Image (cartoon, rainbow, N blue to C red):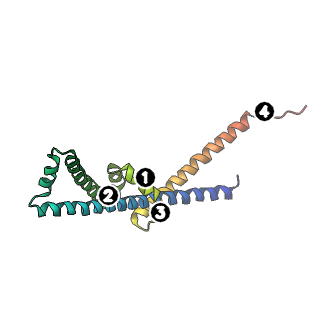
Amino acid sequence: MGKWVKGLLDRLFAVSGALIFMQLPMFTLQYTQQLAGRSSELKLQLNAIKSIATLNGKTMPEYIQKFTSANDPDFFLQGGLMENMMQRYTYLSNAEGYISNASLLAKPFVFFQNFDLEIAKITLSHFQFGLPLSLEGLSYGIAGVGFGCLLYFILNRASTYIYQTLRKARPTETSS
C-alpha cells in the first residue's frame, strides 16, 4: 500500500476516534438533562403532596404514613406510591448532583456508579450528536485520537502480518 494511503488512513482513524470519543461527554450531558427533568417533575408532584399534608396539619411523612397504615388496599397502595416517589426523587436528584459536580477525571466513574438503564435508553433514543467545546470534550477528543491511532496501528500490523504469512505459504513457481 502506498505511503500516502497509509497516511490518509492513519489520519482518518485518528479523526474518527476523536469524533466518536467526543460523543461521550455529549451523552453524559444529555443523560444528566434527563435526570434533571425527571427530578424536577417529581419535585413538583411531591410539593403538591406536601401542600395537601400541610393543609391537613401533617408533615409529609405523617401524611404518607396515614395511607400506608390504612386497611383499604387502594389507600395502602397509594401510600406506597408516594414513598416510591420520594425515594426516586432522592435517587435522581443525588445522581444528577454527583454527575454534574464530578471532576473531569472522576466523571466517567461517577456516571457509571449512578447509571440507570431506563434513562440511558431514553437518552440514546433522543441523542443529538455534537462537538462539545469544553475541556472535557477536548480531553475525550485527545483520548479518541490516541485510540484511533492505536487501532490503526494494530490493524496495520495485523494485516501486514497476515499478508506476509500468506505470501510465504504460497508455493513459489518453478520453471520447468
Q: Nearer the viewer, residue 25 or 96?
A: 96
Q: Give the alpha-carbon distance from disc 1 to disc 2, as whole Å.
A: 18 Å
Which mark is nearer the camera, 3 or 4? Answer: 3
Instruction: Describe residue 15's horizontal placement relative to residue 48 as left or right.
Output: right
Q: Nearer the viewer, residue 73 or 91?
A: 73
User: Upstream in the sequence, badge 3 or badge 4?
Assistant: 3
User: Upstream in the sequence, badge 1 or badge 3?
Assistant: 1
Query: How many other residues sit within 10 Å of disc 2, few (<14), some (14-19) or many (≥20)?
Result: many
User: Upstream in the sequence, badge 1 or badge 4?
Assistant: 1
Q: Amino acid at mark 2?
A: Ile
Based on the displayed image, in which of its 4 quarters is residue 123 positioned? bottom left
**Name of the residue lying farthest toward the top:** 176
Does the residue at mark 1 contact the one at mark 3 (Cβ under 8 Å)? Answer: no
Query: How many other residues sit within 10 Å of disc 3, few (<14), some (14-19) or many (≥20)?
Result: few
Element on which disc 1 rests? helix
Q: Give the alpha-carbon distance from disc 2 to disc 3, as whole Å.
A: 19 Å
User: Upstream in the sequence, badge 2 or badge 3?
Assistant: 2
Which mark is nearer the camera, 1 or 4? Answer: 1
Residue ID for mark 3: 128
Q: Give the alpha-carbon distance from disc 2 to disc 4, as whole Å.
A: 61 Å
Q: Which mark is residue 171?
A: 4
Does the residue at mark 2 contact the one at mark 3 (Cβ under 8 Å)? Answer: no
Q: Position of residue 98 (x, y in %)?
A: 28, 57
Based on the displayed image, in which of its 4 quarters is residue 102 positioned? bottom left
Instruction: Describe residue 157's horizontal placement relative to residue 84 as left or right.
Output: right
Q: Which mark is residue 99?
A: 2
Residue at 22 percent across and 53 percent down: it is: 82
Q: Which mark is residue 121?
A: 1
